[in-house]
Image (cartoon, rainbow, N blue to C red):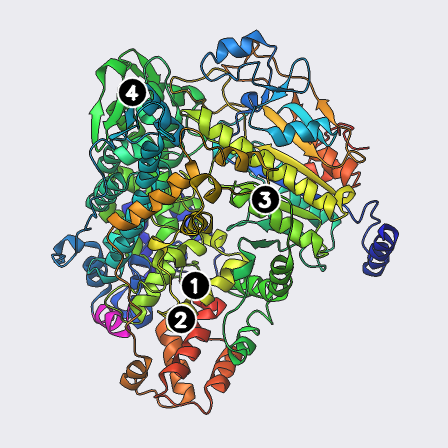
Amino acid sequence: MFLSRTTAALTAQALQGTSFEKHPERILVVLELSGGNDGLNTVVPHADAAYYRARPRIGIPAKEVLKVSDTFGFHPSMVGFERLYKDGRMAVVHGCGYDHPSLSHFSSMSYWHTGVPNAGEPLGWLGRLADDHLDPHSRNQIVNIGTSQSLAVRSAKHSPLVFDDPSRFRREGTDAEKRVLGQFGADASAGGANATLDFLTTTARNAADSSDFVRQASSVYRTPVDYGIGGAFGGGLQRVAALISAGMKTRLYYVTYQGNAFDTHVQQGDVHARLLMYTADAVRAFLDDIARLGRGNDVAVMMFTEFGRRVEENGSLGTDHGTAGPMFLFSTHDRIKGGFYGRPPSLTDLDDGNLKMTTDFRSVYATAIKEWLGYDDTDVVLKGRFDALGAFA
Amino acid sequence: MAGRLRLAVWIVAGSATLGAALGAAPSSSPWVDNLSPIAPTDWNADRAAHLLERAGFGGTPEDIARLAALTPQKAVDSLVDYERVDDSGARAFEESGVWDRGMDPFPPSRADAVRQAREHGEALGVKALPEGSPRRLQPVVDKFFYGLRANTIETQRLGVWWANRMLTTKRPLEEKLTLFWHGHFATGDAKVRDYRMMLRQNEMLRRNAEGALGALLVGILKDPAMLVYLDNGENVKAHPNENFGRELLELFTMGVGHYTERDVREAARAFTGWTNDVLDFRFDQAQHDFGEKTFLGKTGPLDGTDIIDRILAQEATGEFVAAKIYRYFVRDDISPALKTEFGRSFKAGGYQLKPLLKRIFLSKDFYSDASVATQIKSPVVLVISTYRKLGLRELPTIPDFGRLTGALGQTLFDPPNVAGWAGGRTWITPATLMQRGNLFRDVLFVDPKTFRAPDRLMPPTYARVGDNLAKGMNVTEATKEGTGDAESNAQVDRDEDYNTRYASYRGYLAAFERTKPIPRHVADVSLVSMVTAAHADTPEAVVDHFARRFLNVPLPAKNRAAFVAFFQGKSVTDESALRELLYLVLSAPEYQLS
């Protein structure tokens, strides 16, 4: 089964004349936690007195932490992550950030999206990755679950498939109406006098081409796996599972925990616990679900947020915008070398109250690009040299 | 003549760079970036339609003809000087009266309500049951969920009220501007959780929509909804909370790159103690930091209003806000020369909106090819402008307005985050583009019998609780969900001092009971009358009428032929056939263009 899929993909490559693929069957799923997740209360340094000094009221008591090492453990609501970690299906990278960090949600998120901090790069890092390595004539190489397209997937050559509710991803109407509607975008082309109209007709064609497959895949998909009650985030991951289950050729998936949810300035305890629980439930369920489908070894997940939060708690039982935070990589026990990577940032040697990053986040991107997807020229996509971490077997 | 007019503008503008940039522009159209006013001889129905589309929500051919009959100056004045237009017919929002004594201040979370009840024996104006009673905190948790649900329904009603106002107002620019400011000073009820605050903010924005930026800033920075949304109630002397100060600089006034992190922190200090007593602004002296601060180069015991003054003294503020207004009303990209010029004149004129708007709406640039039919309609504008072009006098509520626009990514009173709606091409994905057509099928072929009102809809998880109780199960059995793997389901299934799922169910029931229902009716439209009045009696004539009435760009020949073929053999007195045809026209990619 595995061999035949690989052979088929290789044959397809040879026919299309695209470059050699080491791992044409591999899929990368990128998860974004929007709002700036509080990394210190997610991966808790439970043996560090400085942590409890800085967070006398909102620090997670050591006895409640789900400890996975002498020095670190997960927030008590992240039962799902504890299990993934202990099963060797998860890598945690300490202190991810970039030089001259922005404390603005929108600037910082755009830097993580483009992979080029403090610059006006117009395309997303996943978009550029697809431009360099994936065949633009092969549709739907990138899928973005959401109501709007993320900058991370903005591409020069690919038109990412973006949708939220698959059941509504269709044209309504009688057969006669649909025949007329099906023609919209049929002669789409760029270079007309009205660039906005070109964009619309191209999108219309993309929609007509893909909607049937996506809707079918989602409607027949059933899973016994419990994704929890987190709503849209778990739902988004289920949609990815449905497309993988249906054999969609997509290589890059992007799912967002939307609405700036992790922006916990105030009374963060309960709400942060809930967010982390939903997140851990959904990720754990997704990985179990993919394993159930027999595709576990073909899928890796990367999770990030635009910044961590200030080390010291604020006056409102919350935390303000900060800098570095942990990133997460997941796959199966066979594929990922579980454990901690990078150096934990000091909680006392700070930059104006903020953590000094210890791992450039693009090293983690490079790990996904090179070690997982098998493309060696990470410096082209990332516009600079970043060493991979050795996290994948 | 045109050359002399442009020269005059440069002199008035007093900007050599502007002149140079305009002269050097390699534009295909001499009107692009040209700020000289459009001449009466260039005025026609197409341009009047463009003006009404952008400065309002579009209109019927009759509305457009009225504007076209005026001079451009008078047409623009009739829209911008809207305070002269009688709006005594505008209806006020009718509150249901869901907020009981004891519900203020509303607890930030269910867990917090429970904590209060454990400590004080009551919360939200409701007493806990005596010690030892089963589920003794249930009444408090019921009330908490009632508050959440009732507020959500009131906010939905508020959205319908506002949408109806956009549709029926005789001052369309007033509502278009209020919508602009709602996106600019984005505040969402999902976090504020108080429709009363959202209503007051909406009224404040409308009142100041066309005044001076300074008054708007003071209004928004003292606005309870905004204070709650950006956590400024928690911004206290000992621990300044930076959310408010940061968004003020980054999103409301100057944009990234014109201030330092230190400025953010100093601004946060200056706004310490700006808080609210539920619906009223309050200055809390004890929490205000009266110490010396340095903000944007000025040092002193600065307070919030000093910060606003300092911000208004920056050139970056004029340029940032003027450019955003330009993007909203004209097109996505503003040239550096225009940005400098609009920024300069906006600031020099005391940040008065009216002169800026009039200059924009009269400029040749506004009517250039780069501007006309190059914007993508926001979901709210898409729906409202369609209703206006149909000539509707009352907002259809079947299908539900909030659901229609929400499915496309825009819900009134609930922007996605503090940056508001990103707009432009971000509205369009393959899925939303299809959905933008589908929604008009819902409008034109609605079946009221299968319609389920979202303000009376209980999510399945909670409806199941009711079904289970009706079957005779006890509360514990009736509220079980999940297979047990997910921690979150295990947590909600917990059933000790109270049962969360049961409380949520009861909260819905009480909220349905106490909120006024949204009156439901379908679009009152007759396409037979419309085409008869237009004397369109052949398939070609009907297609052309629809295209002219609804589209802002010419219908491509291929599409026109397909539409004509579709209507061939059908009668212009067949309402259903006309509706099918109109649905096709409104589903065309071209229809998304404003």
Q: Is residue A127 visible?
A: no
Q: Is residue A178 above or below residue A355?
A: below
Q: CA distance from mark 1 to mark 3?
A: 29 Å
**Quarter in which the N terminus of chain B is drawn:** bottom left
Instruction: Tell me the amino acid under the disc marked 4.
Output: His
Residue in the picture at 45% in, 17% down: A313
Going by the picture, which residue comes out furthest to the front?
Answer: B472
The residue labelled by disc 1 is B593
Of circles 1 and 3, the one toward us is 3
Residue B439 percent location from the top left of the image: 43, 65
Of circles 4 and 1, the one toward us is 4
Question: Is the stretch drawn in magenta largely helix, strand or loop?
Answer: helix
In the image, B585: left or right of A294?
A: left
Marks 3 & 4 on one chain: no
Say if the magenta span includes residue B62.
yes
Q: CA distance from mark 2 to mark 4?
A: 62 Å
Chain bearing tag 3 is A
The residue labelled by disc 4 is B120
The residue labelled by disc 2 is B551
The residue labelled by disc 3 is A255
**Quarter in which the C terminus of chain B is drawn:** bottom left
Instruction: Tell me the amino acid under the disc marked 1.
Output: Leu
